[in-house]
Image: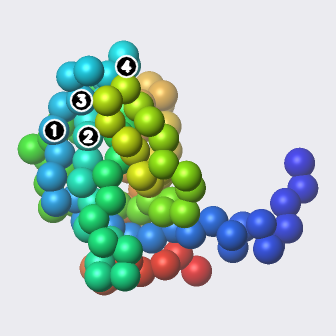
Amino acid sequence: MQTSTKNFFEIDIRKGNIIDAVLFKEAIKPAIKLWIDFGTDIGIKKSSAQITDNYNPKSLKGKSILAVVNLPPRQIGPFISEVLILGLPDQNNSIVLAVPDTSVPNGSKLS
């Protein structure tokens, strides 16, 4: 599969800060509902993430993350997920969140 640079830059990846997180009890697979602050231009967006193997809601509050913010919303049970949180599988195939290693403003765009 060949992808052009143009295709890559169509994906809008931004830095956000998790301001709230709760277990998604209605989900078929274990998940956490997240509310993420992407700054004044984008605002607060919601996401559902299957990251319960490595994270719990309490540990996520205040955490910086990276997410794709320009995909269409997805209905996941009774919840609408507005952004796609980015992560990588560890040796157990459990997701580890992709995070910036230094402080950058909410809404900063990956470039």
Q: Amino acid at mark 3?
A: Phe
Q: Amino acid at mark 4?
A: Lys
The structure residue drawn at horizontal position 9% and vertical position 44%, both measured from the top left corner, is 58
The structure residue drawn at horizontal position 56% and vertical position 69%, both measured from the top left corner, is 12
Any mark on residue 29, and which? Answer: 4
Q: Is residue 64 visible?
A: no
Q: Earlier in the sequence, mark 1 or mark 2?
A: 1
**Of all residues shown, which one is farthest toward the right?**
2
Alpha carbons under labels 1 and 2: distance apart: 5 Å
- Badge 1 vs badge 3, beta-carbon distance below 8 Å: yes
The structure residue drawn at horizontal position 69% and vertical position 73%, both measured from the top left corner, is 9
Q: Residues within 10 Å of mark 4 (few under 14, many from 20)?
A: few
Any mark on residue 22, and which? Answer: 1
Query: Label 3's element?
Result: loop
Residue 54: x and y in percent read: 28, 35
Alpha carbons under labels 4 and 3: distance apart: 9 Å
Residue 102: x and y in percent read: 31, 77
> Which residue lies under the disc numbered 2?
33
Q: Is residue 12 above or below residue 85?
A: below
Residue 91: x and y in percent read: 47, 31
Alpha carbons under labels 4 and 2: distance apart: 12 Å
In screen coordinates, is 3 left or right of 69?
right
> Which residue lies under the disc numbered 3?
24
Q: Residues within 10 Å of mark 1 (few under 14, many from 20)?
A: some
Q: Is residue 100 above or below residue 41?
A: above
Q: Quadrant of the C terminus?
A: bottom right
Q: Earlier in the sequence, mark 4 or mark 3?
A: 3
Q: Is residue 31 above or below residue 59?
A: above
